[in-house]
Image: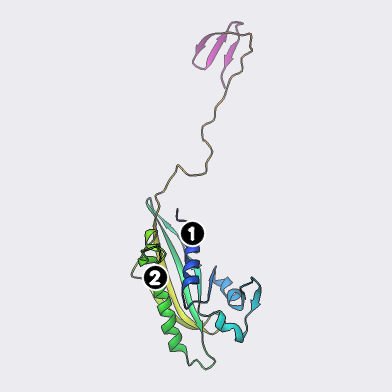
Amino acid sequence: MVNYKKIVGDLSTLIKRHKQVRSFGIGDIKQLSYFIEHFKDEDGNVVDNQPDNNSTRYPLVYVIPQPVQRDRRTKTYSFFVIVADILSPNYSNETDVWSDTLQIAEDILAQFGYSITQEQGEYYEDYDIITPTSITPFSESYDDYLSGWNLNLTVVVSEPLDRCDAAFESFITTTTTTIPPSDLILQENGDNILTENNNNLEQE
C-alpha cells in the first residue's frame, strides 16, 4: 500500500542513493531555515553550520508537502522540491550550481517516472508522474546564499476510495428485553410480548 509515509521514505532513499546529493530534509518553509543552520552528523549529533563543513551538506534536497487531491480511484500527491547548493563568496560558481542542481531535479523526476527494474528501485510500479511540470531557478535564497531549482513534483497513486477499511465502529445498535426465567412467552405481537404471568412487555 502506498501512503504518505511510503512516499517520503522513497524520497529519502532516492536522495541517499544519489551520488551528488549530500543531505535531505522535509517540512514546511519555516523549518527550512533551521535545517540549513543545523544538521545531524553520521552519529545523530546536531551540528551548527560552519563554512568548513558546507561541503559535507551540499547539494541538498528539501521537500515541502503540498495539497493532496483525491478522486474515487486515485490519489495525487504534490511536493515542492528544493534542490540547492551553496555559492562561493564571489558567486563565481553560480552557473555550475544551476547546471548541477537542475540535473539533480530532473533525476528525481526520472526516478519516479522511469525506474522500472528492482535494481533501479521500481518506483514505476507505484507511481505515475504528471508532466509537463515546472522547474524554477532561484539564487541567493533561504538564508545561506543558496542557488538551485524548485521542482513541482506531482505523483499519482492508484488507490480506490475504500469504505471497507475505514476505522468505524458499527452504526447498528441492538437492544434486548429481559424476561424473568419463570415467565414463559405465550405470544409475540410486533414489539409486544405476552407472557404466562400476563406480563405485557414492550421491547425498547
Marks 1,2: beta carbons within 8 A: no
Looking at the rendered structure, the secondary structure element under dot 1 is helix
Residue at 40% from the left image edge and 68% from the top image edge: 111
Residue 128 lies, with reference to residue 48, above or below; the image says: above
Q: Earlier in the sequence, mark 1 or mark 2?
A: 1
Horizontal arrangement in the rendering, residue 151 relative to residue 144 (left or right): left
193 is within the stretch colored magenta: yes
Question: Circle 1: is it few (<14), some (14-19), or many (20+) Cα within 10 Å?
Answer: few
- How many numbered circles does the render carry? 2
Q: Position of residue 180 (x, y in %)?
A: 64, 13
Q: Is residue 137 above or below residue 12?
A: below
Rendered position, 184 above or below 162: above
**Which residue is at the front of the view, 70 or 147?**
147
Q: Position of residue 158 (x, y in %)?
A: 38, 54
- Residue extending farthest to the left is 132
Query: Residue at left 56%, top 19%?
Result: 203
Q: Is residue 130 left or right of residue 54?
A: left
Q: From which residue to which does the magenta span run?
A: 185-204
**What is the three-letter code of the residue carrying label 1?**
Lys
Q: Which residue is mark 1?
A: 6
Mark pair 1, 2: CA separation:
17 Å
**What main secondary structure does the magenta stretch of the protein show?**
strand
How far across and how far down the image is residue 177, in percent?
59, 19
Residue with the mark numbered 2? 109
Q: Which mark is residue 130?
A: none
Q: Residue at x 44, y 43 (%)?
A: 163
The answer to whether residue 199 is magenta is yes
- Report crowding for label 2: few under 14, some 14 to 19, many 20 or more residues within 10 A (C-alpha): many
Amino acid type indicated by mark 2: Leu
What element does badge 2 sit on?
helix
